[in-house]
Amino acid sequence: MPTEVEDAEILSKFQDEKTRNEAFNLLLKKYQQKIYWHIRRMVIDHDDSDDLVQDVFVKVWKNLAGFRSDAQLYTWMYRIATNECITFLNKKKQKNNISLDDVAYELADTLADSTYFNGDAAQRKLQEALLTLPEKQKLVFNMKYYDDMKYEEISEVLGTSVGALKASFHLAVKKIEAYLLSKD
Amino acid sequence: MMSDMENKDGLNDYMSLKQVNPGNPFIVPDGYFNDLAARIVSKKNLEELKNNDPSAGFTVPENYFDELAASIKSRIALEEVVNKGDAGFTVPDGYFDDLEQQIKGRILIEEALGEPAEHFTVPEGYFNQLNKNILDKTVYAGINI
């Protein structure tokens, strides 16, 4: 089984102009799916996710030279991806002159109509429940539940304390449970 | 007391959520991830090209943009004059109302003055004989003039 390339190697290759493209390709191979799914869980629609994931990696390319290793590479990329998603959702709200709740309704419609969703009824209900959550709670839940990230890592992504994140996750889970129980 | 929830065991208290399949319910088009990297690299390269040379290699004549505003203003002024139709010239009141009659009258006059043979005729050789006829009736008839 081929071993995954280490982040340190990617960063080292990126610093050298001669190996920069090779480094970027290694980075893409290692992280494109992770970043894509993080985005997809936020914006639901595949085509929107496709646009955003490309934008995110172009930003990564532009800023990777200045990346300081005091944070992990992938939490740094997650942060970029998260900010792109939030900007996208806010633009959607402004463009259609609707509230964030209405954006959630739109996303729920997208989920209902999507050909790229093959979850069962319970999974669909879970996604609907997630769409009722404030963005930050949704993000915390997704990163904990689907990505199995540690609170310290989520803290690097969101810039929120571990304590606040634990509270946020706990609250999200309670709301989701209530939603799953209340609707048919 | 809030459970630590460092792992999914913390969800045991939430039976409905615990029963949901935690797998990824979203899918992507066939082969999507096979060419995603290449598309990202292409997008990155295009962005770099744009940033390195915003003009994309196209050039303009020297001083083009310095003179452009003045050229546009001249063009606008010229088109306004042309669209006005009269180019600033005027005519006396009623000029065009009488013009047709004047032209027709002028034609008649000029025809009457300058075109004697068009509508009247004389016998053949008339003018050749005219002088002799006048003399015969006057000088040669013994009448002193």
Image (cartoon, coloured by chain):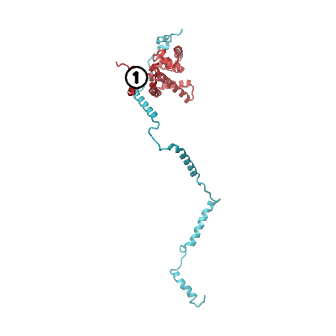
Chain colours: A red, B cyan
Quarter of the image with the N terminus of chain B is top right
Quarter assignment of residue A11: top left
Callout 1: chain: A
Q: Between residues B43 and A148, which one lies in front from this camera angle?
A: B43
In the rendering, at what x and y percent does residue B128 appear? 51, 82
Q: Between residues B74 and A137, which one lies in front from this camera angle?
A: B74
Going by the numbered disc 1, the residue's amino acid type is Ser
Q: Residues within 10 Å of mark 1 (few under 14, many from 20)?
A: few
Q: Which residue is mark 1?
A: A12
In the rendering, at what x and y percent does residue B44 appear? 43, 30
Quarter assignment of residue A29: top left
In the rendering, at what x and y percent does residue A100 appear? 56, 24
Question: Is residue B27 toward the left or the right of residue B68 in the image?
Answer: left
Q: Is residue A43 above or below residue B69?
A: above
Question: Residue lying furthest left in this view?
Answer: A1
Question: Is residue A183 toward the left or the right of residue A14 in the image?
Answer: right
In the rendering, at what x and y percent does residue A137 appear? 52, 18
SS at badge 1: helix
Quarter of the image with the C terminus of chain B is bottom right
